Image (cartoon, grey):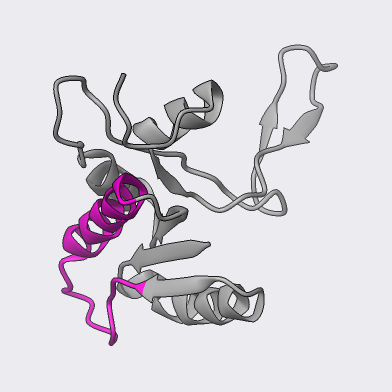
């Protein structure tokens, strides 16, 4: 699988570690930046380019996902969510913001008072809505009916 990665300066070190981990697991990794530490970097462009590459690959029939992250994850997620595929129907990138279970918990309304349950342990990922629809319908991503 091809995995596109984009971050801001706060995620640079983790990005390098993650990319190596993904390569060791046999994935093709495409780094969309940044390449060096710059606290004034323009992170939206890194995240938007990551999302655009995922859309392009999936429309071309390449099995691809994207990962965007940074200091807070807020701006990175917003930037990637701005990407839309051209076409008569709206479709685009959807990201999910995730935190490590070791640092974040939430109270469940179904649990006893004071109990907590960990949030998702997965990394944020980008995937085009055409790909999600295709996965549900069994139709290849990018094909129109």
Q: Position of residue 84 (x, y in %)?
A: 20, 36
> What's the magenta region?
31-60
Q: Residue furthest bottom?
A: 36
Q: In this view, does 57 lie above or below 130?
A: below
Name which quarter of the figure residue 32 lies in.
bottom left
Q: Where is residue 88 in the image (x, y as percent from the top left)?
A: 14, 21
The foreground one among 76 and 53 is: 53
Residue at 77% from the left image edge and 31% from the top image edge: 116
**In the image, residue 21 lies in the stretch drawn in magenta:** no
The foreground one among 113 and 6 is: 6
Residue at 76% from the left image edge and 33% from the top image edge: 117
Count of numbered marks = 0
Q: Which residue lies furthest to the right in this view?
A: 112
Q: Which residue lies furthest to the top in this view?
A: 110
Q: Where is residue 112 in the image (x, y as percent from the top left)?
A: 85, 16
Q: Which quadrant would the C terminus be assigned to in this image?
A: top left
Q: Where is residue 82 in the image (x, y as percent from the top left)?
A: 20, 39
Left or right: 126 in relation to 103 = left
Left or right: 118 in relation to 20 = right
Residue at 45% from the left image edge and 73% from the top image edge: 29
The foreground one among 123 and 50 is: 50
């Amino acid at each position: 699988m091809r995995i596109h990665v984009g971050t801001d300066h706060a995620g640079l070190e983790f990005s390098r570690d993650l990319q190596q981990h993904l390569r060791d697991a046999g994935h093709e990794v495409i780094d969309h930046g940044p390449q060096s530490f710059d606290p004034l970097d323009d992170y939206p462009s890194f995240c938007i380019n990551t999302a655009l590459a995922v859309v392009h690959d999936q429309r071309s029939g390449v099995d691809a996902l994207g990962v965007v992250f940074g200091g807070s994850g807020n701006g990175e997620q917003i930037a990637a969510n701005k990407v839309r595929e051209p076409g008569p129907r709206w479709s685009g990138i959807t990201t999910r913001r995730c935190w490590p279970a070791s640092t974040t918990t939430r109270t469940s309304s179904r649990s006893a008072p004071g109990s907590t349950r960990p949030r998702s342990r997965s990394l944020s990922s980008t995937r085009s809505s055409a790909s999600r629809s295709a996965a549900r319908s069994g139709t290849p991503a990018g094909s129109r009916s």
